Image (cartoon, rainbow, N blue to C red):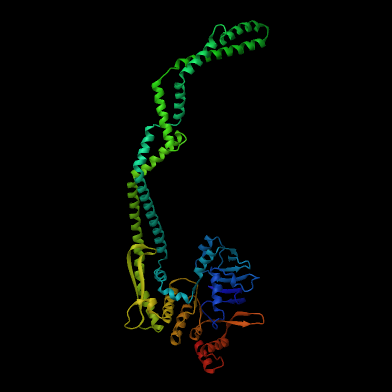
């Protein structure tokens, strides 16, 4: 419950602080006194968008702070998820700085507005005059029924399964698109693949072929140069080997004179051996050189195939052609395996449909089970509120398609008068009747949910007299199990409150301010008398006011 509220530098409010208690609290005041300002400040505390223009003195920051007793509302998990310190008496603070920036705090820890909104929705339900119109809104109608049916966890499960189902449908559509595209290109891709496979590509083959081509294409030059090189090594008179051998004869004669000559002789021996090996390899190379026009032509054709494929596929080498070949194989595989993949995807969707059917059926049964009791309770309350002949009908039908919260279509119908026909509730009820129906719904919800605080902003619109008295009794009864705050213009309702605050404007030489004070017995009698007849001194008005309080 909200235990205290502080508002500083907001709209017409300079600085107010009020303490609030459990039970039924009344706030009254003349039109324009600032009741909407109070609600606006509370809205900021619960995560509404900040408006810089709402700062009273733009040189100072605006601060709205609320203290909440939350020990009975199982909010520890929220504080844990948000990494916040949990306190039974928790403080929410919202600041609007002169720069226009907004800040939010929970127990002095800075938080995002989204965290404020999540926590706020668990602490306070503000019923504005506009919300009464939401009785005709399908989402609101579902929310009421599902709250009473305790469908929260089932709806969460349904939404998760629905998300899975929709993802599977998207995947199936993608597979179908891929299959259609692949089918259109299948024949051409198959031709390209066969062309590449026929080329029998292997890494490094192009370099090997080009090297062999150069050898076969230059046989004459190779033969001539290899022969000349061998000749220069072998000639008896001027051959390199013969010259070195003669040199060695002379060096051997000097070995006995110095180890240095011995080393030189050994080095020369190594050179002679190396040249001998070189001569053998040149001779073997020469023996291998032979003209082979058929092989030359074969290699030439193979290279032309490679060059043409590289040009066709805009590839730099055989390795890139192999990558393209692999990609073509995958594309063709998609086409050839698409049918099996499609069948598997459709099988998964069929399974998911069965899961959704089960969850949506559970939702439907839970809703169907509580609707008769809800209608009965609502009609009983409406009877007390001066609508004895009102009949409520809630039509629940299962549809074929999966909707956002199940397969149900829901419609609230009302016959407000005896003998009247059922119509959509927003068309069948007047403004005052809608207010009474909304109060009936809220009182039933309050008994079902664990909401700490509910604030009614003129729920009494369009009613008066005896009906207002009955409304006050219902609000008073709700206040026995939760904190109820009602902003009202009706003395019949104001008299039912355990606590009474008055909002008023006060003019000074400098500015107008909105203030709020708690009224006690004499002041309450005076306020109720004013609300009754406009004359607080009237004895009849005061007597009526006392009767209302008693």
Query: Can see residue 219?
Result: yes
The quarter of the picture where residue 62 lies is bottom right
Residue at x 44%, y 35% (from the top left corner): 310
The quarter of the picture where residue 56 lies is bottom right
The quarter of the picture where residue 49 lies is bottom right
When the figure is inspected, residue 292 is found, relative to residue 235, above or below; the finding is below
Query: Can see residue 107?
Result: no
Query: Nearest the camera: 85 or 252?
Result: 252
When the figure is inspected, residue 253 is found, relative to residue 393, above or below; the finding is above
Query: Nearest the camera: 350 or 87?
Result: 350
Residue 508 left/right relative to 163? right
Q: Position of residue 404 (x, y in %)?
A: 39, 63
Q: Position of residue 279 (x, y in %)?
A: 52, 13
Query: Nearest the camera: 32 or 523?
Result: 32
Residue 159 left/right relative to 496? left
Q: Position of residue 46 (x, y in %)?
A: 53, 69
Q: Position of residue 244 (x, y in %)?
A: 59, 9
When the figure is inspected, residue 329 is found, relative to residue 222, above or below; the finding is below
When the figure is inspected, residue 213 is found, relative to residue 419, above or below; the finding is above
């Amino acid at each position: 419950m909200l235990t205290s509220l502080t508002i500083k530098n907001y709209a017409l409010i300079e600085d107010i602080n009020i303490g609030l208690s459990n039970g039924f609290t009344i706030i009254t005041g003349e039109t324009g006194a600032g009741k909407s300002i109070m609600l606006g400040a509370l809205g900021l505390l619960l995560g509404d968008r900040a408006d810089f223009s709402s700062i009273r003195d733009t040189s100072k920051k605006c601060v709205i702070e609320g203290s909440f007793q939350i020990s009975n509302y199982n909010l520890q998990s929220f504080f844990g998820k948000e990494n916040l310190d949990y306190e039974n008496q928790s403080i929410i603070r919202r600041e609007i700085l002169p720069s226009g920036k907004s800040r939010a705090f929970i127990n002095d820890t800075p938080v995002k507005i989204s965290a404020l909104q999540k926590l706020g929705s668990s602490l306070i339900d503000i019923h504005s005059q506009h919300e009464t119109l939401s009785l005709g809104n399908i989402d609101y109608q579902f929310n009421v029924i599902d709250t009473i049916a305790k469908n929260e966890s089932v709806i969460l499960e349904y939404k998760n399964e629905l998300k899975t189902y929709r993802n599977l449908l998207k995947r199936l559509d993608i597979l179908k698109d891929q299959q259609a595209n692949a089918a259109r290109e299948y024949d051409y891709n198959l031709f390209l693949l066969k062309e590449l496979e026929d080329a029998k590509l292997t890494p490094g083959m192009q370099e090997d072929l080009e090297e062999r081509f150069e050898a076969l294409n230059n046989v004459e030059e190779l033969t001539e140069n290899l022969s000349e090189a061998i000749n220069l090594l072998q000639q008896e008179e001027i051959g390199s080997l013969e010259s070195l051998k003669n040199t060695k004869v002379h060096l051997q004669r000097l070995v006995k004179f110095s180890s240095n000559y011995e080393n030189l002789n050994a080095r020369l021996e190594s050179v002679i051996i190396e040249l001998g090996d070189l001569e053998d390899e040149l001779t073997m190379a020469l023996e291998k050189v032979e003209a082979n026009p058929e092989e030359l032509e074969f290699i030439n054709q193979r290279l032309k195939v490679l060059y043409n494929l590289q040009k066709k596929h805009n590839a730099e080498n055989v390795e890139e052609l192999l990558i393209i070949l692999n990609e073509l194989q995958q594309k063709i595989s998609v086409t050839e395996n698409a049918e099996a993949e499609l069948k598997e995807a459709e099988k998964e969707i069929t399974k998911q449909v069965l899961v959704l059917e089960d969850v949506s059926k559970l939702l439907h049964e839970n809703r169907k089970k509580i609707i008769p009791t809800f209608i009965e309770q609502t009609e009983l309350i409406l009877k007390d509120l001066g609508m004895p002949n009102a009949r409520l009908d809630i039509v629940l039908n299962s549809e074929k398609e999966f909707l956002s919260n199940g397969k149900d279509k829901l419609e609230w119908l009302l016959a407000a008068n005896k003998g009247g026909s059922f119509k959509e509730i927003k068309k069948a009820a007047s403004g005052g009747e809608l207010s009474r129906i909304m109060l009936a719904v809220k009182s039933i919800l309050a008994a079902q949910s664990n909401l700490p605080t509910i604030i009614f902003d003129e729920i009494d619109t369009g009613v008066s007299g005896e009906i207002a008295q009955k409304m006050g009794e219902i609000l008073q009864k709700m206040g026995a199990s939760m904190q109820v705050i009602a902003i009202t213009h009706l003395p019949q309702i104001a008299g039912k409150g355990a606590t009474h605050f008055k909002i008023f404007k006060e003019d000074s030489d400098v500015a107008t301010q909105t203030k709020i004070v708690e009224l006690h017995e004499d002041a309450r009698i005076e306020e109720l008398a004013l609300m009754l007849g406009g004359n607080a001194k009237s004895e009849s008005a005061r007597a009526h006011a006392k009767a209302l309080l008693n």
